[in-house]
Image (tube, helix red, strand yellow):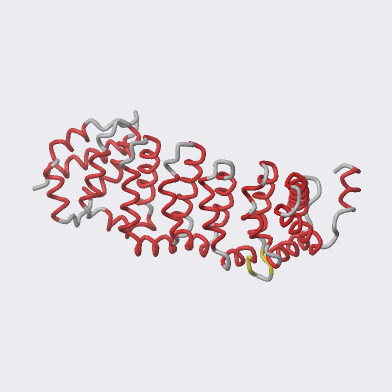
Amino acid sequence: MSFFFRMASRLRPSTSEEVVRSIKDSFLALHTRTHAKALEEVEKNISSLRLLISGDGEVEPNQEQVLQITLEICNEDVISLFVQNLPSLGWTVRKDLVHCWCILLRQKVDERYCCVQYIENHMELLDFLVGCYKNLDIALNCGNMLRECIKYPTLAKYILESGSFELFFEYVELPNFDIASDALNTFKDLLTKHETVVAEFLASHYDQFFELYSRLLSSTNYVTRRQAMKFLSEFLLEAPNSQIMKRYIVEVRFLNIMINLLKDSSKNIRICAFHVFKVFVANPNKPRCIIEALLDNRRELLKLLHNLPTSKGDDEVEEEKDLIIQQIQKLA
């Protein structure tokens, strides 16, 4: 750290209350003073905050001060100001703010994550962040902030059960590839981070969720179709989701989707579809409607399976394919 930086740091507010008050005042001034001057003040304060709570690579932060600042930020409603003013900030200060956000949410004060608790009492902040995927300038920043929130089960549960969650089915098909990919990563985190929360959500929103998800599997957008099929094949076959899988594989509407995806022009989609399709066939308790659907499509299915592209040396898929072919041939 340079001599000049040390000198400058001595001139900054010394107490946590003063640090946070300075940040709060600069945010409030965005709507009352000359915008350029106010933005400059916010940028300076957020840059200072980043140094105080994460250090500069040479000097480690004072952990006691970090906790004090965290508590004061919650007490002064600065968390809300961070979120609500994000669209007004420039690229550099947004980057610093996201960095601070992730550190602040992880701080435990008196055995509680006080920033997480603050958000629990102001859940509209999560709705705001989800809605920000529509803003090209801040979508990726909000995605990072959301994924930090989703690490905590109460916040993930709120998003899943809110009306905002359905927006992700639109976001993953946005024409901007980077934003669509980021939204998909957030979507995946929502469905994989907390097993109990997700199981409860899918149990109570099963039809609604899979109706929306089926649209992604039938999307005309190749990237959407491929990513949706890949995630579904991974998600359903995970042990924690066995009850959801058992429910999924007894429904003809979903079997028909898999059959259609076995015809896809993409090798990757066909392979992923096979991994879900094989569970329909291998299920020892297939209902009559599934057996009849397999029989009605038997000739076409056998042809599709014989022509299923597999990678050289992928003996496991070849063995599974042969077993599924045999089971379809034995159906009566």
On the image, the x and y values in percent for residue 69 come to 75, 62
Q: Position of residue 301 (x, y in %)?
A: 18, 38
Pick the quarter of the image with the N terminus.
Answer: top right
Q: Residue furthest top?
A: 312
Residue 268 location, quadrant: top left
Relative vertical location of residue 98 with respect to residue 16 in this rendering, above or below: above
Q: Which residue appears at 74% of the width and 59% of the height?
A: 24
Count of numbered circles on the image: 0
Position of 201 with respect to 109 (left or right) is left
- Choose between 187 and 230: the one closer to the eye: 187
Which residue is depicted at the point 73% across and 63% down? 67
Q: Give 43 or 263, whichever is nearer the viewer.
A: 43
**Residue 11 picture location, percent across and down:** 89, 53
Give percent across and percent down for residue 155. 52, 62
Give the side of residue 196 with respect to residue 85, left or right: left
Name the foreground residue: 64 vs 37.
37
